[in-house]
Image (spheres, helix red, strand yellow):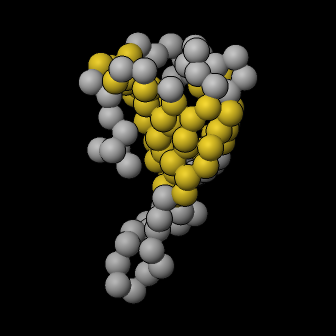
Amino acid sequence: MFSRNRGDTIKEVTSDSDFGPLYWVASSAGDSYYVKLANYGSETQDLTVSIPGTSTGKLTVLADSDPDAYNSDTQTLVTPSESTVQASNGTFTFSLPAWAVAVLAAN
């Protein structure tokens, strides 16, 4: 997820909340923007991400309700889910489940 959605320029991020349990970094490459997110908390986090000039994006989320989940021969495979998200005036609103990592790719 992270290696396929990477920019070549780190972007400044402003936030009205502190790091923890949510962490993030933003980058761009040409007209594409990438916001990588990690929720290391036990509760779902509601997010608003503004990327001026964008209208749609792809949200890829890797999550499992079990914080100790991992892929093995004896456990169900944890796979990413993808969805298209729409922005209103460049603002995306979505929820990030507990124990999840995600990438919002927009252009």
Q: Is residue 50 left or right of residue 60?
A: right
Residue 40, position as x, y percentages in the image = 48, 46
Residue shown at 51% from the left, 48% from the top: 60
61, 40: nearer the viewer: 61
The image position of residue 45, as x and y in percent, is: 63, 40
Residue 79 % position (x, y): 47, 65
* Residue in the picture at 48% in, 44% down: 102
Q: Residue at x 55, y 52 (%)?
A: 82
Q: Compared to 11, does 81 lie above or below?
A: below
How many numbered marks appear?
0
Residue most toward the right?
88
The answer to whether residue 53 is above or below residue 67 is above
Name the quadrant containing residue 5: top left
Q: Is residue 85 above or below residue 74?
A: above
Q: Is there any visible trace of residue 50 in the rendered image?
A: no
Quadrant of the rendered image containing residue 90:
top right
Q: Residue at x 55, y 57 (%)?
A: 81
Residue 57: x percent and y percent?
57, 35
Q: Left or right: where does residue 29 sit relative to residue 66?
A: left
Is residue 96 something one can see in this rendering? yes
Find the residue positioned furthest to the bottom. Answer: 74
